Amino acid sequence: MRAVVVETPGRFSVREVPDPAPQAGEVVVRVHAVGICGTDVHIVEGEFPPTPYPIVPGHEFAGEIVTAAGEWRVGDRVAVDPSLFCGACHYCGIGRGNLCERWGAIGDTVDGAMAEYVAVPAANCYRLPEGMPMTHGALVEPLSCAVHGFDRLPRTLGAHYLLYGAGTMGLLMLQLARIAGAASVSVVDVNTARLEVAAKLGADAIATGAEEFDRARGWEVVIDCTGAIAAIEDGLTRVRRGGVFQQFGVAPGAATAAVSPFRIYNDEISIIGSMAVLGSFGRAVELMGKGAIDAETMITHTFGLDEFPDALQAFRNGVGRKIQIRPSGAREASMASQGDAMRGSM
């Protein structure tokens, strides 16, 4: 099959690799759609510390099962939670699997879905509702991260939110804030085209800098969805006394930001992190299936697998919103036959 392979930081290619060989308890998924996200860029650039090389990236995806296992059958349409928790460490034992001491994820620490096919644990598959397009299914993973982000917030009905970033994650957080009972949502982004989309999706105020807003006491909830140090440092100054700042965007592992310890103490500011997915994937499937997210507005560009370099550059240039790869593999019949043969030999 063909796949994107990041050989070493800064060097990748689209080339032939062996077909995935499912282990016990795994299924093989023919990938119909896989999104590019900021973590993929960090992986390509060598800025995501858990990643080994070489690796096939791609962790937000949906597809069709071609080699079945357990309750799953060939032809089932699924989105896949990329989380790989060990289940035995201290953090898994206290229900914090996303902080697992041996944390892994499909596409981040093991080969992922920027490929025609990918082998995944059967337990990580979630059935897509009837009629949901695969492209929408590939949005479930980022939505599940946003749902976990809201799980981490001490929400109050009628709170005022300030979001930094109107990319995919910022727009998802905006839509969740609206249905979570926000009194208002203000959005900051340097990309004016993205701000226009934020307004379409329900933002009460948009600006290229928070100083343009008129909220003297600040906001009860400030969320950074950019990972950009300048945005983080500015956002920390915008939290209302007694409010919450959430670090949701992924910054480079070695990056640091300046913060006033006195203000955290004196104004009782809470700073909360939110990392990946934890018990939120199934709810994200349901929210997507119910139309809580405007998926059509979110997805703006699709590329073929061989066009990955162009797709990556478009992402870096801030083009559109969610950019997806549509792998072109068409060998599902042979893969299914291989799976039948493997099951017959067990």
Image: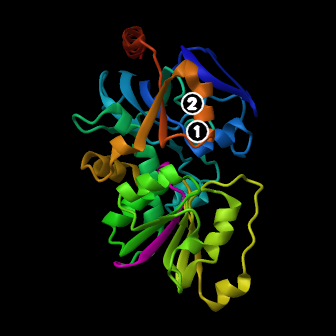
148 relative position to 265: left or right: left
Q: Is residue 80 above or below residue 201?
A: above
Residue type highlighted by circle 1? Phe
Q: Is residue 124 above or below residue 11?
A: below
Q: Residue at x 34, y 65 (%)?
A: 178
- What amino acid type should be assigned to the residue bearing mark 2? Ala
Residue 202 quadrant = bottom left
Q: In the rendered structure, which segment of residues is drawn in magenta?
A: 157-168
Give the color scheme: rainbow, by chain, secondary structure or one colour: rainbow
Residue 1 visible in the snapshot: yes
- On screen, residue 244 versus residue 197, left or right, reads right
> In this rendering, would 137 be left or right of 154?
left
In terms of secondary structure, where does tag 2 sit? helix
Pick the residue in front: 163 or 56. 163
Q: Residue under label 1, please give it.
A: 315
Dividing the picture into quarters, in which one does residue 16 lie? top right
In the image, residue 219 lies in the stretch drawn in magenta = no
Check disc 1: other Cα within 10 Å, few if <14, some if 14-19, many if 20+.
many
Residue shown at 39% from the left, 73% from the top: 184
Using the image, tell me which numbered label, if any, was put on residue 311: 2
User: Which quadrant is home to the C terminus?
Assistant: top left
